[in-house]
Image (spheres, grey):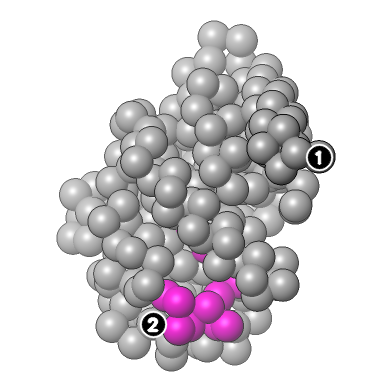
């Protein structure tokens, strides 16, 4: 299993101080940072153009992910890569020629990621898994931070886990939406290894670093408990 990654979503940060907020996340020891890019069409919200990301690139050396919740993402991929994003994540619900788009992201030197809305089955990407470097299972309907975690997604996370394991490739399995110390354990036990955390981090009275540490601890606890259950079940 990959070392679990905690990946804050900047959507819930103070919009007037993005550079400082990114520096704060860096100081809290996060593994990467996700920028939620929204166009007001694919999702009912409007967020970050490439310039916002570029302006915060120097605040940290951790990898940036651009999660493109936009229609016709192909039009913008190069600009988000230029802005400093190592991974570009698109939605098959918005990308008509997904296979070509994934090839394009790779050709431009970035990692090609796919995010699935809650209703979209894994079958939608099974035949292009060879072109995918990063798989994200949404655990909320995209568009806003602070929504409740959809536990119904856990069987899909487990199916994605099996799908990735069957390839033998090192593909991060990310979950996004409603992830917090109270939910990260069950998402991890279902098979996720990369966790986008938004409002839980920025709203924690103990601060970002404390919330990151608690997320890691709760995940480790859950994985240990899960391992012993599997061991008992497996009679080992
Ligand atoms: C929602 C975004 C998420 C969101 C996460 O569309 O993709 O990244 O910001 O925020 P929380 O953790 O508050 O659900």
Of mark 1 and mark 2, the one earlier in the sequence is 2
Residue bearing the label numbered 1: 236
Labels 1, 2: front one: 1
Q: Toward the viewer: 100 or 15?
A: 100
Q: Residue at x 67, y 31 (%)?
A: 229
Magenta-drawn stretch contains 25: no
Q: Mark 2: which secondary structure?
A: helix
Apparent side of residue 179 relative to residue 192 in the rendered image (left or right)? left
Q: Mark 1 touching mark 2, by CB under 8 A?
A: no
List x then y, in percent, for residue 199. Answer: 44, 28
* Tag 2 residue: 98
Label 1 Cα crowd, 10 Å radius (few <14 / some 14-19 / many 20+):
few
Q: Compared to 186, does 5 lie above or below? A: below
Real-space Cα distance between discs 1 and 2?
A: 43 Å
Residue ID at (55%, 67%):
163
56 or 31, which lies in front? 31
Left or right: residue 115 versus residue 5 is left
Image x and y of residue 10, in percent: 49, 41
Q: Could you tell me which residue is drawn at 58 percent across and 62 percent down?
A: 162
Check residue 128 for magenta coloring: yes
- In the picture as drawn, the residue positioned furthest to the right comes out as 236
Residue under the point 63% across and 59% down: 172
In terms of depth relative to the viewer, which is nearer, 125 or 39? Answer: 125
Task: Tell me where the magenta segment starts and ends, as one range.
Answer: 125-136
Instruction: Depth check: give the residue in front, 99 or 198.
Output: 99
Residue that protrudes farthest toward the front in the picture:
235
The C terminus: image quadrant: top right
As drawn, 96 above or below 69: below
Whether residue 66 is visible: no
């Amino acid at each position: 299993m990959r070392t679990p990654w905690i990946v804050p979503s900047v959507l819930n940060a103070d919009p007037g101080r993005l550079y400082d907020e990114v520096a704060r996340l860096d100081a809290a020891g996060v593994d990467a940072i996700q920028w939620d890019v929204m166009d007001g069409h694919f999702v009912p919200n409007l967020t970050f153009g490439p310039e916002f990301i570029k302006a915060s690139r120097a605040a940290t050396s951790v990898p940036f992910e651009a999660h493109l919740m936009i229609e016709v993402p192909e039009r913008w991929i190069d600009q988000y890569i230029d802005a400093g994003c190592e991974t570009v994540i698109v939605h098959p619900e918005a990308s008509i020629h997904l296979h070509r788009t994934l090839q394009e992201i790779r050709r431009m030197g970035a990692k090609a990621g796919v995010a699935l809305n809650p209703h979209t089955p894994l079958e939608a990407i099974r035949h292009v898994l060879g072109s995918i470097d990063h798989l994200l299972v949404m655990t909320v309907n995209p568009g806003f931070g602070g929504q409740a975690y959809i536990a119904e997604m856990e069987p899909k996370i487990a199916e994605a886990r099996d799908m990735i394991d069957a390839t033998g490739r090192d593909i991060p399995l990310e979950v996004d939406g409603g992830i917090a110390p109270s939910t990260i354990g069950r998402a991890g036990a279902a098979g996720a290894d990369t966790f986008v955390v938004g409002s839980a981090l920025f709203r924690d009275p103990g601060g970002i670093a404390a919330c990151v540490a608690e997320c890691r601890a709760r995940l480790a606890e859950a994985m240990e408990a899960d391992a012993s259950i599997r061991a008992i079940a497996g009679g080992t």
